[in-house]
Amino acid sequence: MANKSRVLQRDAFSFVQQPKNRNEDNDRLRGAKYPSVFLFGIDSISRMNFRRSMPLTSTFVSQKGWFEMEGYNKVADNTLPNLMAILTGRTPRQWRSQCDVRKSGCLDSLTFLWNHFHNAGYLTAYAEDLSSISTFNYLKMGFKRPPVDFYLRPFLMVIEQAMQTLEYFGFKYCVGRKHSFTYVFDFAKQLIERFVLEQPKPIFGLFWTSSFTHDDFRGGANLDGLFVRYLEQFKAYGLFERSIVILLSDHGSRYGPLAEHYTGFLEERQPMLHIYLPPWYRRRYPSVERALTLNKNRLSSNYDLHLGIRQLIEQIHPRLDFIRSVKCDYCRSILRVLPRNRSCSDAGIPDHWCTCKPFVTVRITLFIRRLTQLTVSRMNRYLKMLNVDGVCHRIKLNKVLKADRQLHFNELGNEVPSPNNVETYRLVFTTKPNDAKFRSIVKSNENNDIVTIQMDMISRLNSYRNESYCVDDALAKKFCMCYAEQFLKLGERGVLKVRKVKYKFHENEDDYYDEAKYNNHIS
């Protein structure tokens, strides 16, 4: 019998190649004077949950040279707009007005931080695990051409198809013999070894992982030991001697047990942010060290971080003039002293995501219930506007769980009436048929006859998982519960017919509120 070869194991490796068309003499000079900048991102980790679930990493970033920004507040709902604020300095309205990210070529037309660093003579790198839900590709077209010098996505897409994978929460958690995130940080390690330790060249890199933490608030505990091991290896390669390192997240838990907890409002809105300055940099720029020390407990945002990273280029190219992309008159570089009495509007943080505004719990009255019913009605209208109401259940209010009203104070600390007599309410409620849980900001005037509801200010607090498979719009996925499909075998030829199964409401459960009774303005 002929011998047959048998594959015992498979593995995959990425290799960092020497970049072409580089002037080695110039690179040597830049490598001696320019700080490399590394951003390491962990998805869905709040400042509190980082300390709670990743104690080893938390201890590592408590060493001298590290600065934790405890007042860091996100500016948008999910990963894309929060990272876009950091990488481009633009609000969702700004980049959406320029082009549609669902269309090919849109992202290539935008200017990112890595473009600025590339123009300043840096090498650039970007790597992210879980290619199916990566920041610039989930429900979007991604980049037509590699956005950076070292781009890991093509490699990850190939090995996810070629190698056996293990799924966790529906994502490719393990690829071959390794965790998905390992390929990203092995890639970072190679770049550090090559261009920080062996042949110093200035490099800007973003390395992002979602596989452990995106859908599991406990995932950080599994990641902790692995992650701090990489940091120790990076330290051995000299990363922290020459480079500025930023450890960050996009937001905290947006849904699940932590989001539904009474502290969930803060958990969701305060992602972790730690900034490291190497010794030589602290000696050369003592004002930056002083600023980060003072800014630790001051309000800061993604736009401030964007301006801070951009400041690093301004320090080495003082004559470089940037187009002001941040449409926020009072946003400041996080590397400069921020005002002590700063407001969310000063930092470019929309009201819904602001953690500084005080609220008081109010009784759930008929008026509160009607405001909530209007919110649900507006959610249905949004689905209808997208022409997906035929594939999504019509949702109805189930229960109002909590209602808070915003308080307003003058400079002396005395409570005053709301500006223009418009009250702001924060509502937590569930809908049926799928018991979805939401938090919404609703504004009502003095006579309670004009109501303003913004769709992007409605947060989904429990996971929709696969309920919304039938829609592609990111916002609609929060609201939509797709009709279940039953396949019925008909006749001898085995023809399949699809029947939509609708949820049945009892007549006494129909609590639809007629919007026509109110002269409401809903945006």
Image (cartoon, rainbow, N blue to C red):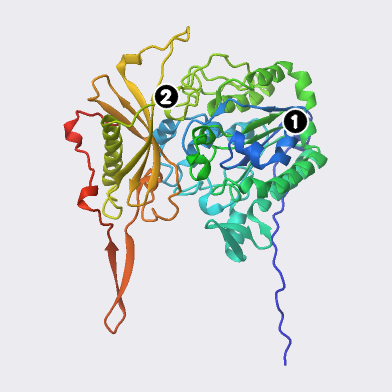
Residue at 31% across, 20% down:
422
The total number of labels drawn is 2
Give x and y (percent) for residue 330.
50, 17
The residue lying toward the viewer, choosing from 145 and 335, is: 335
Q: Is residue 232 visible?
A: yes
Mark 1 highlights which residue? 30
Which callout, 1 or 2, points to the residue nearer the camera?
2
Q: Amino acid at mark 1?
A: Arg
Give x and y (percent) for residue 522.
27, 31
Residue at 77% across, 19% down:
284
Q: Of the numbered discs in the image, which one, if any, rests on residue 47?
A: none
Residue 216, compared with residue 501, is above or below; it is: above
The residue lying toward the viewer, choosing from 507 and 310, is: 507
In the image, taking residue 7 as reference, residue 70 lies left or right, namely left
Q: Amino acid at mark 2?
A: Val
Residue 198, compared with residue 452, is above or below; it is: below
Quadrant housing the N terminus: bottom right
- For label 1, the SS is helix
The residue lying toward the viewer, choosing from 32 and 340, is: 340
Disc 2 crowd, CA 10 A, few/some/many (<14, 14-19, 20+): few
Badge 1 vs badge 2, beta-carbon distance below 8 Å: no
For the residues labelled 1 and 2, the Cα–Cα distance comes to 55 Å
- For label 2, the SS is strand
In the image, taking residue 461 as reference, residue 253 lies left or right, namely right
Mark 2 highlights which residue? 360
Residue 445, compared with residue 462, is above or below; it is: above
Outermost residue on the top side: it is 412
Give x and y (percent) for residue 216.
56, 49
Outermost residue on the left side: it is 516
Residue at 48% across, 41% down:
260
Quadrant housing the C terminus: top left
